[in-house]
Image (cartoon, rainbow, N blue to C red):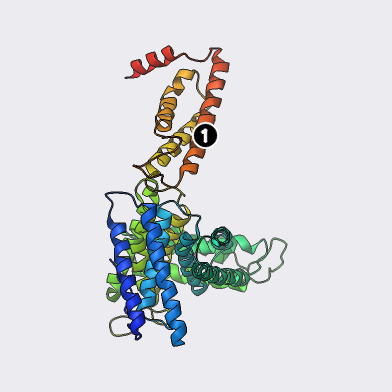
Amino acid sequence: MTDSPSIHLPSDPKEQSILDNLLTLRDDLSLLKQDRSTYIRADDVVKSYEILIKQVRALNDVRKESGKPQEQNRLDTVLEDCFQLISLAFMTIGRNNEAPATYSLSSTMKRLLDHLVEAGFYSYKDLNSMEAQIQIMRESLQRGQEVYCSELINLLSTRLDYCSKVLIDLKARIPKLCQVLSPEWEKLVSILRSLAAANTRSCFPEAEVKSLEQELFKMRDGLKDGKFVHSDGKVPSNQDVVIALLQRCLLWAQLVQQKRGKIDQRYSDTYNKLREIRNQLEKLELTRSWSMREIDLYGYQRQLDRIDESRVDGNFLDAEGNPADLHSQRTLLYLIRRSYAHIWFLLIASEPVSEALLPIYNQLQTLRRCLVEVQKSGGVSSPRELYPYSMKLSSVDNMRVDGKFMVGNDIPEGQGSINVLMAECFDILHELRVEAESNSGSGTPTNQDIAQEVAASA
């Protein structure tokens, strides 16, 4: 497991006792994460959550007595680890809309926002997703006020308030561009990121970089006296920021072509580690429906946090304390930011279904997509063509016991989501059958018809 960043131990013996308890809890949660022989049970997660909150309350009491409520030591970093693990575990068992699950989302959002502030260029699209998610998380906290402890609710509310404030500041920083310049700004942001992505490919895409550079040249050549000009001859206001971004893109394109994906050897270890994290997260995005457990994201989060927090005044330093050159600095920052963005996507795309029921949920999603495609393509010519879909849906329906999907004696989270999906599949199937019967003029197929069809396809 990736340990917390090195930081001094607590000086208070009472805090040391709490630290020991938290270290034990973190180890237990890590073992739970690593065990893929069975699914994570809700009872185990809730029990761990209660242990964590007990330690949080004990810590608050100790620091209130000592008069040092803001002290930061190793206990705080281990506490952060435990909260992250608990939060991701809540998402793994399908309780995405409950307060503890909000912790990991808010942590990742804070990282992304802080990096947007540092980068200084972004678009409204970058902010809209997070703004909508803040509202969803606030609703989760509102529902959880009567269920979860006030310490957790207050902590998360404070973090969401911080994120909201940063979002407002970021929106205010985006220049109020006229209709002429807004598309140019969005295009330049996209080109800059595309250049950064090309710069980290295993094989340097020279033709792609050249093509992006040509787009920049075209924009630059379209300036008149160094300014963007409207078709009616007027010079739009607030264009200095757009011109500055254009110049930055041109310089970066030139630097990327000079380096051709080769980073300073002093930072190669960090670069290779970040590329590996980014690549693994990209693979998870493709296979998440079938192979990802949210709690698995913890290891990537901790590795990224450690690398991000190792910077000094925003700079990566070599072994002798010298700051990285511009190319290395921007390349490493791009990989960090891109990896956090992948984690953000995986978190908000997580379904409120326990991992124990995900195979069933995924089968129904696939079945629904197939039925929708059949519907879009004009339906079927005969009800018999719907037999495979009917049989699959019936087989899933027959898995229920007293109307519930059971795993052993447990009733995992996500029953409602699966039932809604099943109902949609039944509805689409019914519509297709009615339409097929109407077109063919035949009646509803008998059980004998179905049996003969099944025998013929066996």
Tell me the SS state at disc 1. helix
Q: Is residue 268 left or right of residue 327?
A: left
Where the C terminus falls, by quadrant?
top left
Residue 111 in sight from this viewpoint: yes
Q: x%, y% of residue 303?
A: 34, 68
Where the N terminus falls, by quadrant?
bottom left
Is 276 or 36 nearer to us in this picture?
36
Is 309 or 213 nearer to us in this picture?
309
Question: Mark 1 sits on what residue?
Answer: 423
Is 56 or 443 nearer to us in this picture?
56
Residue 399, by quadrant, is top left
Q: Is residue 217 left or right of residue 325?
A: right
Q: x%, y% of residue 273?
A: 30, 66
Q: Is residue 65 above or below residue 352?
A: below
Residue 205 in sight from this viewpoint: no
Residue 84, by quadrant, is bottom left
Q: Is residue 219 above or below residue 248?
A: above
Q: Is residue 264 above or below residue 143?
A: below
Residue at coordinates 53% horizontally, 64% vertically from top-left? Answer: 188
Q: x%, y% of residue 210?
A: 42, 60
Image label count: 1
**Residue count near mark 1 (Cα–Cα under 10 Å), binned few <14, some 14–19, many ≥20:** few
Residue 14, by quadrant, is bottom left
Q: x%, y% of residue 42?
A: 39, 53
Amino acid on which disc 1 is placed: Ala
